[in-house]
Amino acid sequence: MQVEGKIKMIGEVKKVGAGDFVKIELVVTTEEQYPQHILIEFVQDKVDLVDPYKVGEAVKVSINLRGREWVDPQGVTKYFNQIQGWRIERQDTSKHPQPAADNAAQYKAPAPAAALPSEEEEDDDLPF
């Protein structure tokens, strides 16, 4: 799976627990009608992947969804979800330039109906 958007926040590298486990959190804001702020964690050897990126950059992040079950001391079962990143790459925002209002004339209009073949001509080309 992938998440595309702009980096909103990059956290600090954190050590978790007494061991050598490290993680960094990144928030990507999607660019859609209702933007979503997606928290993505990079863990262990993937932490360094975030280093070259800055807030505001357009990125595509490859993710895995993780889920786990936990039973509290009272015997109540709870479920937790986690989004883990495993690759991040810059998006080329120049691929899809938005046409400017004053440049609208350079775009071709669809062909007029008179230029389309008539029904008789279309029937001649039928393979059956």
Image: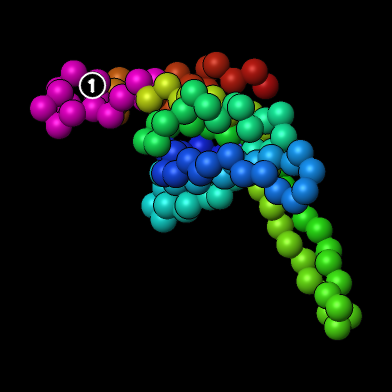
Q: Which residue is mark 1?
A: 107
Q: Position of residue 53 (x, y in %)?
A: 47, 28
Seen in the picture, residue 72 relative to 32 is either above or below; the reply is below
Seen in the picture, residue 36 relative to 26 is either above or below; the reply is below
Horizontal placement of 93 versus 59: left or right?
Answer: left
Q: Nearer the viewer, residue 35 or 127?
A: 35
Q: Quadrant of the C terminus?
A: top right
Q: Quadrant of the N terminus?
A: top right
Q: Residue furthest left?
A: 102
Q: Residue at x 40, y 36 (%)?
A: 55
Q: Residue furthest front?
A: 18
Horizontal placement of 56 versus 76: left or right?
Answer: left
Q: Residue at x 18, y 18 (%)?
A: 106
Q: Residue furthest right?
A: 75
The figure's colour scheme reads rainbow
Q: Is residue 102 magenta?
A: yes
Q: Is residue 64 magenta?
A: no
Numbered disc total: 1
Residue 73 visible in this rendered orientation of the protein = yes
Q: Position of residue 97 (x, y in %)?
A: 31, 24
Q: Nearer the viewer, residue 40 or 117?
A: 40
* Residue type (three-letter) at the residue carrying disc 1: Tyr
Horizontal placement of 123 versus 77: left or right?
Answer: left
Element under label 1?
A: loop
Residue 116 visible in this rendered orientation of the protein = no
Horizontal placement of 45 versus 117: left or right?
Answer: right
Most common SS among magenta residues: loop
Q: Position of residue 34 (x, y in %)?
A: 41, 55
Q: Nearer the viewer, residue 77 or 112?
A: 77
Q: Residue at x 53, y 50 (%)?
A: 38
Segment colored magenta: 94-109
